[in-house]
Image (cartoon, rainbow, N blue to C red):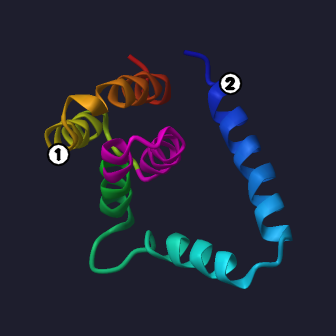
């Protein structure tokens, strides 16, 4: 898998966020700020919080969210072994319906980390 997907994902996300933020809607801006702050270092390190976000995103079957958290986990130094431990938790919690999303996530992890 080419690294092109990372650039495309980030560019699309940035353009879509501009549209949302340009609406000027205060409630939406507040929610986005709350979401961003939830992953800041606290009693749990950011790395752990991003892994939690990844598991939740796999269980909820949101591929954009999975991609977002994969990139953030990679930035936080998550190892291949840690990614697959998280995938296992998501599979146990989410069941077989999460498998297609797990496959996509695994493909992206291998692209991020390499074989």
Secondary structure state at the residue bearing disc 1: helix
Residue 44: x and y, percent? Answer: 28, 72
| Rendered residue at 86%/69% (across/down) | 22
> Is residue 64 on the magenta stretch?
yes
Dot placed on the residue nearer the N-terminal end, 1 or 2 = 2
| Rendered residue at 32%/68% (across/down) | 45
> Is residue 44 on the magenta stretch?
no
| Rendered residue at 47%/27% (across/down) | 108
Which of discs 1 and 2 lies nearer the camera? The answer is: 1
- How many C-alpha atoms fall within 10 Å of the one at disc 1: few (<14), some, or many (≥20)? some
Magenta segment, which residues?
A: 56-76
Left or right of 50 on screen, residue 14: right
Secondary structure state at the residue bearing disc 2: helix
Residue nearer the viewer, 10 or 42: 10
Residue placed under numbered mark 2 in the picture: 4
As drawn, the label of residue 93 is: 1
Dividing the image into 4 quarters, which one contains the C terminus? top left
């Amino acid at each position: 898998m080419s690294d092109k997907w990372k650039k495309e994902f980030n560019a699309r996300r940035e353009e879509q966020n501009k549209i949302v933020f340009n609406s000027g809607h205060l409630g939406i801006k507040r929610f986005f700020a709350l979401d961003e702050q939830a992953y800041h270092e606290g009693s749990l390190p950011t790395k752990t919080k991003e892994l939690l976000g990844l598991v939740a995103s796999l269980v909820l079957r949101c591929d954009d969210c999975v991609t977002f958290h994969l990139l953030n986990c990679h930035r936080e130094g998550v190892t291949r072994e840690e990614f697959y431990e998280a995938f296992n938790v998501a599979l146990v919690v989410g069941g077989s319906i999460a498998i297609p999303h797990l496959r996509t996530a695994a493909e992206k992890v291998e692209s991020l980390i390499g074989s």
